[in-house]
Image (cartoon, helix red, strand yellow):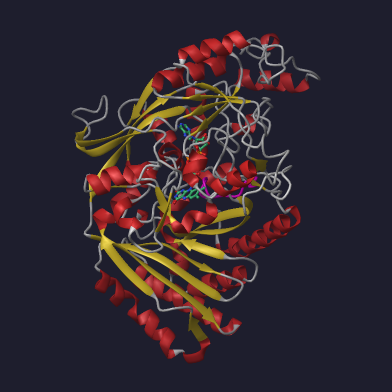
């Protein structure tokens, strides 16, 4: 909550016709007449750091300050040239994007944001580099951005005229047999865990923990997502219906807060900061430099079920949806099953589910009644091909060598000299570099699966599918999960709606990588806006099912005006208190992040809150 003194300052500032550019920060308890610091510096402002200042920062970070060149500089004048063609080809390689200081995994979102490189970046090698960058940004009133894996859909890891802290090089991974957080000895039992540098991506963590260590750690489904970004989002992986949210597995974090202090946050030390970074969203409370996550015993097998079913008529499609909802409730609504299905305007049901803790034959037996029902329905339904039910030894599920031999499972980083461990799910190819037209999500309460509610649910799914493709991600809702996974999620900042949700419904649309001003690669704005309107209508068809819509911060609508209620629900006031404690002057800003209502959309100007 905003203090009375601060509110007075903000009101006073709002009344000013003109504010001097990037003045020094106000003291902790300023008198109203002293209030000055309401606009951050941009290049060209008199107070923008001098070349000598930047040189000192460069020295402080061991020469790892980068003057960022726009990746598009060579492209704009010669869009058909070889370097531009190569660049757009590389935008389908998430490892290339991840290794580029000036790129993000999403190229933009229509009418929302366009990926824009920072002016300077600190390619941090360790916590000392992060401290130096935080101090420099704070003292010089710069717009600060943090990028790890670069997968933010909301564009929160890039900003024009900013200083970037880029954690890509901080990716050490250490397994522990018996971890106890600092200050927790005698209070919290030692447990197996893994410590991971903030810039690591999940594929490399899974390879270390599962392939090499024979353990399980809860991370994201997409293998190239960054560790620190996902943990702070809440974070769901394919098997979260059993193991819970990734943030809930956090045992400890090292985090540099706005004062430049290196804080340890765990259940015993800085517990409120610890709670806040578990789901409070990346980029709002500080720079996480290392996380330590609980690990679990591995099951014997992980597996997947794929099928695509086309209904011959709208009537048949309604029956198919109703049958699937019934089948899900009776047979799949338990910790064994995760991932998603989608419903589309062409009357197609696409099934891409995963399982853990079952053998292939047990999984086949689970699905038999559903496929028997389809077979008995004759001409009404057509399978695109034979359903696929596969399983692999769990230890190989993220084993790059094993996966490379499975046809169609993964794609590899094809740059010369790339690490053999650089693979990604083939299913994530479309998302590399894409340009978003729309993206919305809502948690669906498990009560909708009750027999008397199922008809409402399936009719709403049908209505929604008339507008746009609607997917149900079962692993992103915790209803049906074990009690300990639900209890741990309750101790995060994520909207409690996740606890009672059987699925997160997601509707989204996109085009290929696109950038304004680059001929032949510009976004198709007309098509994009049409798609956005259809996506909006698809979501509106579902919303009457939910009394208080909640949405997953990382996979949500950029334009959601009720964002704080959507992402955090009743947890938001507590998050604001954490923000006030650790970043009272708002050094850390992201679009629709905690405390962002005090800032202009671009994060440069502090504005009074309503
Ligand atoms: C293709 C794709 C697939 C996805 N799949 C999943 C999925 O399976 N499950 C899921 O839960 N989510 C998924 N997401 C969403 C993803 O988890 C979030 O966007 C996450 O925040 C990305 O983290 P990042 O480090 O890759 O991204 P970034 O864009 O680098 O960071 C995301 C946010 O976190 C902040 N941040 C990054 N590093 C730090 C740090 N060290 N300290 C403080 N703040 C930091 C950034 O400033 C930014 O605000 C997916 C996104 C994409 C694009």
Estimate the x, y position of residue 576 in percent, counting from the top left: 52, 31
Residue 415 percent location from the top left of the image? 46, 44
Asked whether, in this view, residue 254 is left or right of residue 18, the answer is left
Q: Position of residue 165 (x, y in %)?
A: 50, 26
Residue 32 in sight here: yes
**Towards the viewer: 204 or 491:** 204
Q: Quadrant of the C terminus?
A: top right
Image point 35% across, 45% down: which residue? 421
Q: Is residue 399 visible?
A: no
- Of 388 and 419, the residue lying toward us: 419
Furthest-front residue in this view: 82
Residue at 68% x, 25% y: name it.
Answer: 605
Q: Which residues are magenta?
A: 552-561
Dominant SS type (magenta)? loop
> What is the number of callouts on the image?
0
Q: Quadrant of the N terminus?
A: top right
| 10 relative to 474 in the view: left or right | right
Residue 460 drawn in magenta:
no
In this rendering, the answer to whether 476 lies above or below 346 is above
Establish if 15 lies above or below 387. Answer: above
**Is 5 placed above or below 309 here?**
above
Which image quarter: residue 328? bottom left
**Residue 280 picture location, percent across and down:** 47, 37
């Amino acid at each position: 909550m905003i203090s009375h003194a601060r509110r007075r300052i903000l009101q006073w500032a709002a009344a000013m016709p003109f504010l001097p550019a990037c003045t020094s920060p106000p003291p902790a308890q300023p008198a109203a007449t002293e209030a000055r610091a309401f606009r951050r510096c941009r290049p060209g402002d008199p107070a923008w750091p001098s070349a000598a200042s930047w040189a000192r920062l460069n020295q402080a970070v061991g020469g790892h300050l980068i003057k960022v060149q726009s990746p598009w500089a060579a492209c704009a004048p010669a869009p058909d040239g070889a370097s531009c063609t190569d660049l757009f080809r590389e935008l389908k390689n998430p490892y290339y994007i991840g290794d580029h200081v000036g790129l993000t995994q999403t190229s933009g979102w229509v009418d929302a944001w366009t990926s824009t490189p920072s002016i300077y970046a600190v390619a941090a090698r360790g916590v000392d580099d992060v401290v130096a960058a935080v101090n420099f940004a704070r003292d010089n009133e710069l717009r600060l951005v943090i990028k790890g894996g670069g997968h933010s859909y909301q564009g929160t890891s890039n900003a024009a005229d900013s200083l970037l802290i880029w954690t890509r090089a901080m990716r050490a991974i250490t397994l522990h047999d018996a971890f106890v957080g600092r200050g927790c000895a005698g209070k919290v039992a030692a447990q197996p865990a893994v410590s991971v540098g903030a810039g690591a991506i999940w594929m490399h963590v899974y390879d270390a923990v599962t392939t090499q260590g024979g353990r399980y750690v809860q991370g994201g489904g997409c293998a190239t997502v960054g560790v620190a970004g996902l943990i702070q989002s809440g974070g769901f992986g394919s098997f979260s219906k059993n193991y819970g949210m990734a943030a809930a597995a956090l045992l400890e974090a090292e985090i540099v807060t706005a004062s430049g202090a290196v804080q340890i946050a765990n259940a015993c030390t800085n517990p409120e900061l610890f709670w806040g970074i578990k789901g409070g969203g990346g980029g709002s409370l500080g720079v996480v430099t290392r996380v330590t996550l609980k690990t679990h015993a591995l099951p014997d097998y992980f597996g997947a079920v794929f099928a695509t079913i086309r209904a011959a008529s709208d009537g048949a499609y309604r029956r198919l949806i109703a049958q699937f909802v019934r089948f899900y409730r009776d047979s799949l609504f338990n910790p064994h099953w995760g991932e998603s299905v989608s419903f589309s305007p062409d009357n197609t049901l696409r099934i891409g589910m995963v399982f853990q803790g079952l053998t292939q034959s047990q999984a086949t037996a689970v699905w038999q009644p559903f496929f028997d029902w389809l077979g008995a329905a004759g001409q009404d339904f057509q399978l695109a091909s034979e359903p696929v039910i596969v399983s692999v030894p769990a230890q190989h599920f993220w084993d790059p060598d094993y996966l490379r031999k499975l046809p169609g499972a993964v794609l590899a980083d094809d740059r010369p000299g790339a690490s053999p461990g650089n693979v990604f799910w083939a299913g994530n190819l479309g998302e590399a570099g894409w340009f978003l037209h729309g993206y919305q999500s809502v948690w669906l309460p498990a009560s909708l699966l009750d027999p008397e509610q199922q008809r409402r649910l399936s009719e709403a799914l049908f209505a929604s599918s008339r507008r746009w493709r609607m997917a149900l991600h079962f692993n992103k809702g915790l209803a049906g999960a074990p009690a300990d996974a639900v209890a741990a999620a309750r101790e995060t900042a994520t909207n409690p709606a996740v606890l009672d949700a059987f699925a997160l419904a997601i509707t989204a649309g996109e085009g290929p990588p696109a950038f304004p001003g680059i001929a032949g690669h510009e976004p198709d704005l007309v098509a994009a806006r049409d798609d956005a309107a259809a996506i909006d209508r698809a979501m509106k068809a579902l919303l009457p099912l939910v009394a208080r819509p909640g949405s997953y911060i990382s996979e949500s609508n950029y334009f959601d005006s009720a964002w704080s209620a959507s992402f955090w629900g009743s947890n938001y006031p507590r998050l604001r208190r954490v923000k006030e404690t650790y970043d009272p002057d708002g050094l850390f800003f992201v679009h629709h992040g905690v405390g962002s209502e005090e800032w202009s959309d671009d994060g440069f100007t502090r504005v009074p809150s309503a």
